[in-house]
Amino acid sequence: MKNPTDVSPFVEAEEIIAELQKQANSIFSSILKTPLSQLTITDKGNFPYYWQNPTNLAFNNKTYNWIASNLKANTTPVQLDQVFTNFYTQVLSKVVYSLSTSDTATLNTAQQNAVNQQVALLNSWKQAYGSLPPATPTMQPIDVIMNTIATQWASPKTTLSEIQVSKNLNKLLNNTPASGKVILPVLANYLNALGASVTLQNNVTMNNGYVSTALGNVQTPSSDNGGLTLDNNTTVPAFQMTTQISDILNGLKNTSQAVNLTMEVSRETSDRFTVSVSGSTGFSIPILDFLTVGVSGNAKYFSDSLATTENKISVSMSFTGATLVNFGPSAYSTATGLNWAWFAPIQEAIKNGSKDVTGFKFSPNPNIDFSQNGPFGLLNGVAISNYPTIVIKVTSSNYQSIQKTFEQSSSVKVSFLGIPLASASESTYSSSTSVDSSSSTITITLNPPQDLIAGNSVDSLGWVLGAVLDYPGN
């Protein structure tokens, strides 16, 4: 029997969320590429599924803050933590496209042979624009110039190799500004001097240019580079929802698709319960972290009057409207230069390590654990439901008093695993009772308010049954 202390209720109640996850996996097995995992609900709360603000159609910042989180390292069940793009920026800023020793020697020789043409090109650029572009951590001014010409002076984008063999530069570089026209013949001389090594130069220039663009997009998101504007008027690196709100609401309204829990509860000590899920051995949990029922002014009515040592009690819950919601980061496009999530260079850098090969590498190493034990992970989806309907069955000599208490109260406040199921600002749960006097048993049914069933506001929440994990560096 578990008896953990000072941990999240969801961690203590792992058997409960494991059962929710298991049933959700069964429901969605035909459409899931990877099984759902258990997710700990912490201070970020359950999932704000109404992701588009109905008043201005902007993306709900509550939803964004939830889906843009990374996965905390070394936690079971997994839990949301900080902002994933912070880790992504830390990693991508260390990625460099570099050449092997032999390829470097080949390019160096070619560049030495072309040094006069390179100087001429740099001078031509300076005369046209007043100064050379500043170097970046991965690109010298000549690389920045080459990248600018290939990606901004041509539509569609081109390559240095295509520029080298082009018979009509004006046609190929069809977006060349007027100030750049004098640079084109000098550019042609430089690329011709590089000869066959221009492919190596192109790979270094273009790939580091792509990394620089993706990094700039995530560091300074804007409407021009694919950034997402939220309903609080901030612009952030874009994530996208691939499940429409109408589909989410239709799923939540399908109350026949449900995940059900049956739990036997007994009093272990004055401040702990033993809870058995579907006949399991049972686990120990603090009484206030399991289930609280506030009725007739007594916030601890469940532990004070229902789940006592004298009573026999079972709790059943039905999480209706099980629905799968998919989302993820917006992928960077080398063709358009929009958005930011470009994991291929990171994956290649991890694979290449310290090998003497041409390709993406870390310089220096970001010292991030890319395994499923590390923080470089995020969610690609969640299975959610409506907040549960709860049925509490109590066998007690005081069953008539219990019945009277509920009959005299129009509403009930409930929490489960530390999560309030209704608050002062919302409708509270309604209750109904039935009694079997022959067995001194009362059955209490607690129904969630209607605004918690497929709610349609930016504050609407879905109970998380399980999550789709993604560790893009693993």
Image (spheres, rainbow, N blue to C red):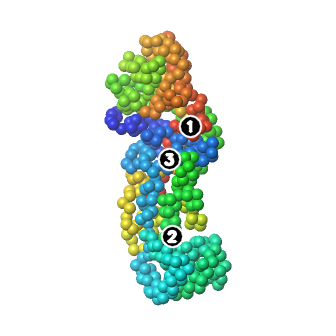
Residue extending farthest to the right is: 171
Q: Which residue is mark 2?
A: 209
Q: Which of pointers 1 and 3 lies earlier in the amino acid sequence?
A: 3
Q: What is the CA distance from the residue labelled 3 to the residue labelled 2?
A: 29 Å
Q: Which residue is mark 3?
A: 65
Q: Amino acid at mark 1?
A: Ser
Q: Judging from the image, what secondary structure is the residue with disc 3 in?
A: helix
Image point 49% across, 50% down: which residue? 68
Q: Which of pointers 2 and 1 lies earlier in the amino acid sequence?
A: 2
The image shows residue 147, relative to residue 257, as above or below, that is below
**Left or right of residue 83, residue 458 in this image:** right
Is residue 152 visible in the rendered image? The answer is yes
Question: Residue 379: x, y in percent?
Answer: 49, 49
Question: Residue 304: x, y in percent?
Answer: 39, 20
Q: Which residue is mark 1?
A: 460
Residue extending farthest to the front is: 130
Q: Judging from the image, what secondary structure is the residue with disc 1 in?
A: loop
The image shows residue 216, relative to residue 250, as above or below, that is below
Is residue 245 visible in the rendered image? The answer is no
The image shows residue 190, relative to residue 9, as above or below, that is below
Quarter of the picture holding the N terminus:
top left
Question: Residue 287: x, y in percent?
Answer: 38, 27
Label 2 Cα neighbours within 10 Å, binned few <14 / some 14-19 / many ≥20: many
Q: Amino acid at mark 3?
A: Asn
